Amino acid sequence: MSFLDLGLAEGIVRAVTEQGYSAPTPIQAQAIPAVLAGGDLLAGAQTGTGKTAGFTLPILHRLATSGVKHASTTSQRTIRALVLTPTRELAAQVEESVRTYGKYVNLSSAVIFGGVGINPQIKLLKQGVDILVATPGRLLDHMQQGTVNLNNIEILVLDEADRMLDMGFIRDIRKVLAVLPPKRQNLLFSATFSNEIKALANGLLNAPTMIEVARLNSTVEIIDQKIHPVDRDKKHPMLAYLIKTHNWSQVLVFTRTKHGANKLVEQLEKDGITGMAIHGNKSQSARTKALSEFKDGKLQVLVATDIAARGIDIDQLPHVVNYDLPNVPEDYVHRIGRTGRAGATGEAVSLVCVDELGMLKDIEKLIKRKLPSEVIPGFEPDLNAKPQPIQLRSQGAPGGGRRPQQNRSGNGGNAPRNPAAKPGGPGKSAGGNPRPAAPHRSGGRGR
Ligand code: AMP
């Protein structure tokens, strides 16, 4: 099947082909016709499946070919499609995709998110925009200031809706929904289907087409995964040992909390291992600096929390270490999917202490395989150690950490995977992800 077979306009197909994509990914093959048909959509898909083009391409097609006459000047345009995303990075990437795929159609786009000045955004909005990509917090700021007009929205996308809920955006989203015209097409993308997501979908979507693709199965298969059992207080020396003995030069390490990330960087420094932490409490410039030094090979280790890692897009990242296992099993797949891209083999190791055996079980259930376990001589875990409760949030950072997810751990809140869904996503394209242009290279939470 080709993109042309899906019924997309020639100019859109040309732009996609220029990106080097010859065939739609499974999510695209299902989502594009559904969106073109005009109905609502509930899609279960994560990053790496090609979901962004899955909604961007048909939106471009619909707006470019639908009844509304193209305004001759941009200032006459009104916002017709609104995409909400949880993070600044994702917003910037989605809008970059809109621009890339929409280069041959007469539509304009803009991205707005927090953490940067609001005035340039006001100016952009005044100039006239067809497709707006936004994080909920900053969009609300614009709504309150009266600098954005959402009266003509025809299509609404909630991208990574589960993340938006995790990050506490539900009230902001509801405030946005309240001002949108009731007659519109709604597309909801989410990696998981907690009860909260189901409730949101029930209230928002009208007889939606439902599609779900398993994520990155093909990638998961080419990643060499293992766990190293270890005592809770031996994780740091074990990590230093692994980095040194294997001579790892570019390692992305995941910790559960921001405090844990900072502490680990300090500890590694004492071992002569260069590292930096990126998380929600770091300034934008600190994050950008850490990421670019890591990409350039100046930093051996980048320590990240799950949310901060969302925007990291590094080709050929050889090593991912789960210093702490994620409490949401899907995050495991997301984390390790950062290695083994573009067909490259990658390695993902998880340091697992007795407190995390429940999480390990949840992860193994999700990925439908048992992870091989390798005890490292000198780090044999104490077999009599008693599990302790896991702290899911940095101490002294109320509201700053990720909301605890006990209800989702154990996969209890997730809908069963669609057995008919085809596995696999595209690998990372050789051309890489389109990068946001300055000043849109921004990270962190939406506000
Ligand atoms: P996404 O899931 O939207 O974040 O996309 C993941 C990656 O797949 C991005 O780097 C896209 O550029 C790439 N991609 C999107 N569509 C295709 C396709 N049809 N074939 C190959 N790669 C694609």
Image: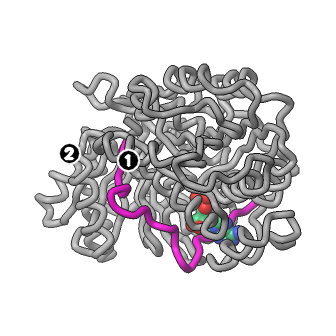
Q: Residue at x 38, y 41 (%)?
A: 122
Judging by the rendered image, the residue that carries numbered circle 1 is 308
Q: Quadrant of ligand 1?
A: bottom right
Q: Quadrant of residue 18?
A: bottom right
- How far across and how far down the image is residue 400, in percent? 32, 29
Observer able to see residue 219: no
Q: Position of residue 1 (x, y in %)?
A: 87, 72
**Nearest the eye: 343 or 379:** 343
The residue labelled by disc 2 is: 263
| Residue at 35%, 39% in the rendered image | 114
Q: Main secondary structure of the magenta part?
A: loop
The residue at the far left in this view is: 270
**92 relative to 307, above or below:** below
Tell me which residue sits at (83%, 35%) in the image: 208
SS category of the residue bearing label 1: helix
Q: Position of residue 391 (x, y in %)?
A: 36, 29
For the record, the magenta segment spans 423-444
Q: Is residue 50 part of the magenta span, yes or no?
A: no
